[in-house]
Image (spheres, rainbow, N blue to C red):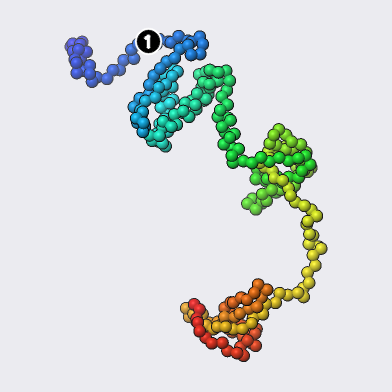
Amino acid sequence: MKADIATYVSKCLMCLKVKAEHQKPSGLLVQPKIPQWKWDNITIDFVTKLPRTQSGNDTIWTNGQSDKTIQKLEDVLRACVIDFRNGWKRHLPLVEFSYNNSYHVSIEAASFEALYGRKNHAAHDRRKSYTDVRCKPLEFQVGDRVMLKESPWKGVVHFGKRRKLNTRYIRPFRVLAKVGTVAYRLELPQHLSRVHSTFHVSNQKKCLYDEPMTVLLDEIHIDDKLRLVEEPVEIIDRGVKRLKQSRIPIIKVRWNSRRGLEFAWEREDQFRKKYPQLFTKIAPSTSAAS
């Protein structure tokens, strides 16, 4: 009976259409011939059902080992679709370049390197063009004095520990030699002998400090008798400052100072004690302050 059921199911059209297969996949692997030289063999396949672009394209044509290429390109394009939606077409050349310039474990090299026998320097050169836009050239001569940025060396005991209050640059150092194109060897003091003496130019700036321009505090003499005197001229207005539980009489005073005429509101009781002569002539009360 079991054999009859199996025979019936195997011949049932509906079962053939809907029943899932649990056997091993059919067909043995047929390896393609290994090309003797580049471009001897080209496999072609299409990646379809992509989001349609504004020009109506929804398919890309891939060359190379198609299945693996398609899988990689689809993964990258998935990320592009998330960010750019239907604008993935504009980024397709960059995706192609990134894939061909990436290291492949199977061939232990990038596709470009395997094909042309050398590494592709386009990305390397492009990075320099991007970086140079945000940087400026800076050169020093042997014997120049430079300040050294402290931030890369936080934690080095010799530079001191003041955390956020650390100085941005430390003492001027003399340039001993130029190392390469963007680094200089500096003359460090003896207590910094364990610190590598070569620094990138981005961590340095030219020292414009001039010692003769410095004035020592010992040479400055201050006359304690000199005072800056600012005298009130007259009272021009009166008012009352209103607080929650009190009222304070105030006056508007015109001052004569080196900066010219100035006006300020003062407390009347305190001002009357210091300058009683101004109150011989009573000023009218016209305003109130709060």
Q: Quadrant of residue 278?
A: bottom right
For mark 1, does the 10 Å Cα neighbourhood hold few (<14), some (14 to 19), or many (20 or more) residues? few
Q: Secondary structure at mark 1?
A: loop
Instruction: Answer above or below: position of 231 versus 70.
Output: below
Q: Quadrant of residue 272?
A: bottom right
Total count of labels: 1
Picture residue at 50% right of the left edge, 84% below the top: 286
Percent x, y for residue 200?
68, 38
Percent x, y for residue 67?
41, 19
Give whichever of 261, 225 is nearer the camera: 261
Instruction: Answer above or below: position of 107 versus 289.
Output: above
Instruction: Answer above or below: position of 63 versus 226.
Output: above
Picture residue at 53% right of the left edge, 21% below the top: 112
Q: In what quadrant of the picture does the N terminus appear? A: top left
Percent x, y for residue 237?
55, 83
Instruction: Answer above or below: position of 137 versus 231.
Output: above
Q: Which residue is mark 1?
A: 28
Could one spot residue 105 in this view of the protein? Answer: no
Lateral position of residue 229 relative to residue 18, left or right: right
Q: Amino acid at mark 1?
A: Leu
Could one spot residue 52 in this view of the protein? Answer: yes
Percent x, y for residue 229?
70, 77
Picture residue at 36% right of the left edge, 31% below the top: 55
